[in-house]
Amino acid sequence: TLWRKVAEQLAEKVNNHHSYSQSILSGSLALILMTLPCLVLLIALKPLVWQEPLYELALLLLALDWRSCETLTKQLALALSREDKTRCRELLKPFVNRDTETLSLVGIGKAGAETIIMGFGRNVVCVLFWYAIAGGIGALMYRLTMELARAWSPSRRQYAPFGKPAIQ
């Protein structure tokens, strides 16, 4: 997505690995730089909308993402039923932060199940939770922050200290 590409470009510019504390600071500032303008814009637009419930609903629909989980589930199930390891690995690679080349079919199935369950929880259940707590703005801000946490995952070496503020 465009959000992820911008996040990766920003991380490339400011994540320089000089020191642990500097990486934490640059990760915190990058998180603020990405989320604060969105938050200000969403709050500023709220009084300008024709119907506030429609605005809230539009933000909820933008924040929800069950289609990617559904698509991955269908494609992965089809590839697993054909025992096509290379296709399964290609499907999983963008979603997992580990090497998929050494996984067996059982390992691919486990990784796929974990990815689908966690993705549904993150992209649907948690979004609905934040919608109930903070409305459409809260749901969309949660989703944008989670996308940053995925893009800057500290489990990948290049984002180890830099991505910590996004996951906390």
Image: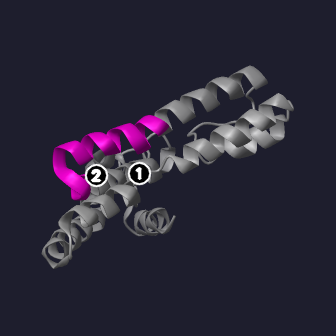
* Residue 31 on image: x %, y %: 29, 59
> In the drawing, what numbered circle is on residue 139?
2
Residue 165 in view in this figure: yes
* Residue 70 on image: x %, y %: 59, 43
| Magenta stretch, residue numbers | 120-138
Q: Which image quadrant is residue 40 in?
A: bottom left
CA distance for labels 1 and 2: 8 Å
Residue 134 among those drawn in magenta: yes
* Residue 60 on image: x %, y %: 33, 55
Q: What amino acid is found at the position of numbered circle 1 in the picture? A: Leu
Q: What amino acid is found at the position of numbered circle 2 in the picture? A: Ala
17 vs 56, left or right, is right
Looking at the rendered structure, the secondary structure element under dot 2 is helix
> In the drawing, what numbered circle is on residue 64?
1
* Residue 45 on image: x %, y %: 20, 75
For this rendering, which residue is in front, 62 or 154?
62
* Residue depicted at x 39% and y 48%: 149
